[in-house]
Image: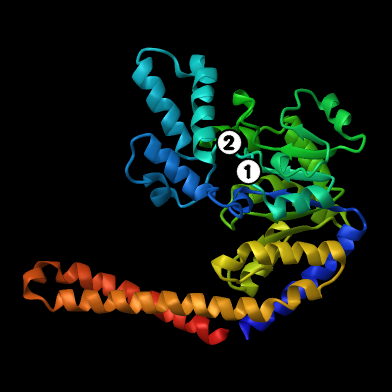
Amino acid sequence: MKYDEMIRHNDLMLDKLIDSYAKFKLIPFIGSGFSKNVENFPDWEVFNEKLSKKLGKEEYFLSKIFKNHLPSIGADYYSIKLFRDRHPKKDLQLYKHNLKSILQHAIEEILDKDIQNKKSDLHKLLIDKFDYIFTTNWDRLLEVNKNGHSIKIVSDITHISDIHEYIQNNGEKIIVKMHGTLEEADNIVASETDYLELVNNNSNPLNIKYQNELFHYDFLFMGFSFQDLNIKSLTYPTYVIKKDKFGKDQAPKIFMIAFSGFDPIIADLYDQLFGIEVIFMDVAETDITDSTMKFLESVINNDKDIITSQYSTYKQNLKTELTDKKNKIEKEIEICQTTVGNATYAILHEKFNKRIAKLKYQNKLLEEKINTL
């Protein structure tokens, strides 16, 4: 029944989003996962892994330790390593600009500097149907897919008074890049320290602009995970105020699309703790882009049938994907059991038995999920 519960839950979210869009109150906020819809673009974890390997690290060790997806947590290591190699006796802070430039070139290489052929219907849809977009992404996918529209990129507001320049946009589409752009090395928010400086700087004009909008507009987060601190650290302070000062159901809302199985406990926790209403899209990996497009089209066109008519297909595709994963796990269990039975590998019995136990647990979870579809 969980899949059917998810559909009913999402139906309620759709009603709210359709109403918000119709009233010109809805602002998309896209993270790195949204760019993954474009072929050959890495998500945040893959990006960090590639950056860490570029540093000479064969294993993406930081993610194994922290498990918290801080922005480019390999970037601090990268900068410090190069700096120490070249200037072992110098003060790190004196070379901050040089370090940022080195990082800028590394990011460009990983994200593919030449993206002129990276066409994306999802990015085009956002530019066509929304005049105001927030993003933490450095990539130029929105610009490349502007579809003839005039775009204003906002990534560096030096003074509070500069904010007013962007209120009257004169027909331009405004894209606020909270983590900077690749054109301006000094403004890139890429390392752990960059990020912590951003979220803890209460006088940062971009933070002020974003938090001000949270009091006036509804936001739709796409391309973020539950672990992403962009959502929690930047939205929580305003949620506390909204919860206290706005009347019941009057506060501007925050929505988030999550590609995971429907979990009513998670939904309730995020609603109660952060004021975030989660939309669960439990689909096969091959259906992520299509389901995102269909969901947005339902909101924009005030037509819920666009997405609801696809749920049976998504459900079947998901079942097929999970069954394939289950079959692969069962084959691996069989190989491990054969290895354990081979006297030559007796010394490895404990290791393989632990692996078998882990695989059997994964298999059990997959079986339980398949039975709910």
- Would residue 109 appear left or right of 211 to someone viewing this image? left
Point 53% across, 80% down: residue:
319
Q: In this view, does 149 lie above or below 121?
A: above
Amino acid carrying mark 2 in the image: Asp
Quarter-wise, where is residue 37 in the image?
bottom right
Q: Which residue lies furthest to the left in this view?
A: 344
Crowding at dot 2, Cα within 10 Å, few <14 / some 14-19 / many 20+, comes out as few
Q: Name the residue under label 1.
A: 117
Work out whether residue 52 or residue 90 is closer to the camera in this orientation and state it.
52
Amino acid carrying mark 1 in the image: Asn
Q: In this view, does 54 lie above or below 81?
A: below
Q: Name the residue under label 2.
A: 114
**In what element is the residue under mark 1?**
loop
Colour convention of the picture: rainbow
Counting the numbered discs, the total is 2
What is the x, y in percent for residue 366? 46, 78
- Would residue 107 appear left or right of 197 to someone viewing this image? left
Point 85% across, 71% down: residue:
303
What is the x, y in percent for residue 112? 54, 38
**Residue 250 visible within the image:** no
